[in-house]
Image (tube, rainbow, N blue to C red):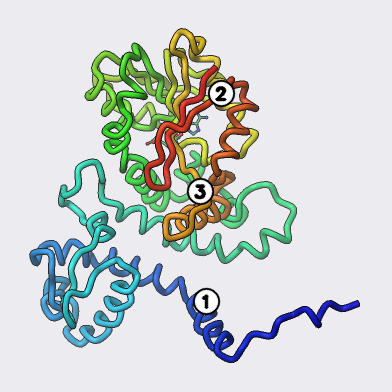
Amino acid sequence: MATQAQLTVPTDAELLQAQADLWRHSLYYMTSMAFQCAVKLGIPTAIHGLGGTAALPDLVTALSLPPAKLPYLRRIMRLLATSGVFAATDVEVYRLTPISYLLLDGVAVVDGHPSQTSVVLAATSRHCVEAALGLTDWFRKDVAGSPFEDLHGVALFDGSMAEAEPEIDAVFNEALKAHDNSGFLAVLQECGRTLFQGLDSLTDCGGGNGTTARAIVEAFPQVKCTVLDLPRVIDNVPADGVVNYVAGDMFSLVPPAQAVLVKLVLHHWSDEDCVKILAQCKKAVPSREEGGKVIVIDIVVDSSSGHTHEAELLMDVAMMVLTNGRQRDESDWGEIFTKAGFSGYTIVKKLGARGVFEAYP
Ligand code: SAH
């Protein structure tokens, strides 16, 4: 029997609202593209150069745009002000918001928050947008790789991508650095003592160019830091005499230390791979009694609502479209720690969408 009788027919008012919501959902990408356009034109930096607030005509002049484009710029700015990228202080006058502060180029405004322009350029790049357009085809195909890999024939952040598409690879790597390096000073401030005080040594597993490790040594000079990353990454890092760099593979061996840090690495990998990586990390540290621990800093999806939750879910689908990784909630993380053989874990701090965990051998 059909269950049609149970279907509640929406009211006219609900249908009208639904139609507006349908437009909004179908046209969300216009916000992303207007956002990209603002970043490419350098609007946040121009507003900053004009003293933090700018009237539209001054903005047109500062950006060297044809004067006839002013009415079009007004429309873009109005949309972006609605989504919080800028704020309208008056008709036609715009000022920076915390989002636009993150998009200032060549201006060191917020300590520990490098400019995120490359993140916007990478996330809205043709390569990513096309991969997202391929989602339906990808669902119907029995393939293992991501839609990005399926479409472009190379995996994001893979060595072969650097050879096949050096330009876009450089944008992605810049974005990864900007994203991963932001917010670590907040971690040091909020829970640095709990994590690093009293440690004699630490390996930063997948530690990239050593920015995080150097910040740890600066705050806690007694910690001897080693950075493990792939040879193609380590080979390009100049020796600094502060941190020890090791080229290797975290699936085979993690250099031993009292603690291992794995920051924003695991969300790139499947659950099975995370268990393998964490098992190697566990092998590298001594027992819990001897102070052994693995510190994981990564995205934690929580069940709250609002913008942060929506951002976590968007990041999760982005990971699905672009990589083989995913974002996890606290119980997913707990399950992975247990499978990797840890006896227990604590969540030390939640900072925005990120969580700081300690897992014990
Ligand atoms: N932890 C850093 C970088 C995170 S990006 C930060 O927070 O800034 C993920 C890092 O993992 C990249 O630097 C990448 O080169 C590294 N990586 C990927 N596969 C690896 C492997 N098999 N062994 C070691 N490092 C690896």
Q: Which residue is drawn at 15% across and 51% down?
A: 107
Q: Are marks 3 and 1 in contact (CB under 8 Å)?
A: no
Q: Label 3: few (<14), some or many (≥20) within 10 Å?
A: some
Quadrant showing the N terminus:
bottom right
> Residue farthest to the top?
290
State left or right for residue 2 relative to residue 90.
Answer: right
Q: Which of marks 3 and 1 is nearer the N terminus?
A: 1
- Read off the residue under disc 1: 26
Q: Residue at x 29, y 38 (%)?
A: 186
| Front position among marks 2 and 1 | 2
Amino acid type of the residue tagged 3 in the rendering: Asp
Q: Label 2: few (<14), some or many (≥20) within 10 Å?
A: few
Q: Residue 302 carries which label?
A: 3
State left or right for residue 339 relative to residue 205.
Answer: right
The image quadrant that residue 238 belongs to is: top left
User: Do we see residue 232 in this rendering?
Assistant: no
Disc 2 within 8 angstroms of ligand 1 (CB): no
Question: Residue 267's x, y, as percent?
Answer: 52, 41
Q: Quadrant of ligand 1?
A: top left
Of residue 346 and residue 240, the one placed in the foreground of this image is 346
* Mark 2 element type: strand
Q: How many marks?
A: 3
Q: Residue 344 carries which label?
A: 2
Q: Do the residues labelled 2 and 3 touch (CB within 8 Å)?
A: no
* Mark 1 element type: helix
The image quadrant that residue 336 belongs to is: top right
Q: Earlier in the sequence, mark 2 or mark 1?
A: 1
User: Do we see residue 347 in this rendering?
Assistant: yes
Amino acid type of the residue tagged 1 in the rendering: Ser
Of residue 101 and residue 170, the one placed in the foreground of this image is 101
